[in-house]
Amino acid sequence: MARKQIVVDKKYDVIVCGGGTSGIAAAIAAARGGASTLLIERVGALGGQLSFSGPPGFAFAHLFNPRGEQDAAGIIEEIHARMLKEGHALPHLKPEHRLEGGYTFSYVDPDWFSITIFEMMEEEGVELLLHSLVVDVVQDGDKVTGVVAENTNGTMIISGKIIIDCTGEGDVAVRAGAPYEYVDKQTVQPHTLSFTMDGVNWKELLDWIHKNPEQLAWFEHVLPHWPDERKETAHQKALEFYRTCDDPKLFGEFMGFTSFHKKGLETGEWHKFSGIGFFLIPREDGHVQAHMQHSSQVPEVLTDDAWDITKGEIECRRQNAIALKFFRKYIPGFENAYLTRMCPELRLREGRRIMGDYKLTKNDIAAGQEFDDVIGKSHFKAGAHHTVDQNTIAQVAKVCPQDDGSYDIPYRCLVPLKVENMLIAGKHVSTDRDAYLRYLHQTMVTGQAAGAAAALCVKRGISPRALEKRVGELQRILKQQGAIIDGTH
Ligand SMILES: Cc1cc2nc3c(=O)[nH]c(=O)nc-3n(C[C@H](O)[C@H](O)[C@H](O)COP(=O)(O)OP(=O)(O)OC[C@H]3O[C@@H](n4cnc5c(N)ncnc54)[C@H](O)[C@@H]3O)c2cc1C
């Protein structure tokens, strides 16, 4: 029997495809701009890699550059402040020994994040269509006029004036004919399946760290990147911190456990795909859980091949089973810890980048580049590609912005080549490989800008490409919404 085809009567101003961090920021900003907004999401949850297959280890993080200036705000700051007030987030933490790389932590509870977002969608009047996969676009020449979604009802055709692709992989933009870049199988960064453990005896763990601070990866991996003149002071400060800190929340992350790791490799009780370490998830009443996002790493998986992704899902579960046993047997404080959450699907670290009217580059990041069409900022380094090896975290070929400041993200990175009436936001915006804007705070910055831009285009009756010449109005709106557009260079 043929699939039922359903043409939805309502024509939306803005259709957001994908409800991850970029998609929810886009939908909120579009609705605030007065646009009738529909958000279509493949699964039943909102938050993407933050809630469904996450959270990322540093979540939220990097909202402050190494000089301590906040460079990412707007909707991300608003959500963090709201969750902090409700007891579902930790305050902005700025551990001195991590600030050199701009590592600040502003953790949120991933499950409460998803609940908060559902509340906000209702407050903002965003319509939701969940359990629906966008499989194609409707086009009139190079203009996109709607999307095709598959769900239990059948094949839905939904019209929209501006379509925003927030799928993380650029699936919708590719269907519309936008060009993209991707790496090959040997080069692609590994993907991960994350899990969470509760029942950790934090006192036992911290007692061990107080006595064995140099077993943490910070000394091996972070310290070498400090400038020579500040290295010794940083070393001493970090030693003092790890010897005395009694609050796990202030650590942000725990990586290394080098002697256990070495032993595990010798006895075959640890696998060769990653190092040992974990991050934190804040829960109610100050409780924290350990969140493992690097305990499995799968190489040679291209995200535009479902066979590859399937292989990755199988392999990561095999590695996580090894890691779970190892943590309980060897890591101090984990003897009675137990698994509370194995994420339902792989977190995809490196996918396609859609090419737009500007391609942000590694050189732009190194220069802390300013752009006239700035829509947001970041200080996160270029490069830093993860590899499958026995390190816990990526340290290769990093380039940080000069003078410890931030760089601008231009609006043109959100406007895909060869397609009209479409915007892109999230980790697949237009950059070279090294400048990949895949960090969560970056996806919310580009999401908010795309949503505000889409609403403005509808109001003015112009295309996203035409808005490039009138970007001042967009910048004013973003500033009113709390985004950071000026300074921090
Ligand atoms: C292992 C790992 C560790 C990381 N660690 C950090 C970290 O420490 N700090 C940090 O800031 N970032 C980290 N990141 C990066 C960050 O988590 C992600 O890049 C970011 O969350 C991506 O957001 P997004 O909105 O672009 O995409 P996603 O969160 O992937 O959202 C895309 C959404 O679109 C939906 N979707 C996809 N296709 C369709 C379709 N065709 N139709 C409808 N819906 C669709 C998906 O279901 C999903 O909900 C990490 C990533 C990985 C993989």
Image (cartoon, grey):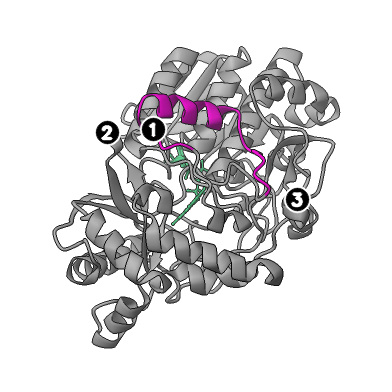
Magenta part of the chain = 67-91
Q: Which residue is mark 2?
A: 285
Let me know if residue 84 is in the magenta part.
Answer: yes
**Which residue is rendered at x = 70% and y = 57% of the image?**
432
Name which of mark 1 and mark 2 comes first in the sequence. 1
Where is residue 268? Give x, y as percent.
25, 83
Mark 2 touches mark 3? (CB < 8 Å):
no
Image quarter where the C terminus lies is: top right
Name which of mark 3 and mark 1 comes first in the sequence. 1
Q: Which residue is mark 3?
A: 359
Pick the front one: 221 or 450: 221
Q: Secondary structure at mark 3?
A: loop
Where is residue 331? Give x, y as percent.
25, 68
Dot 1, crowdedness within 10 Å: few (<14), some or many (≥20)? many
Where is residue 190? Give x, y as percent.
46, 65
- As drawn, the label of residue 430 is none
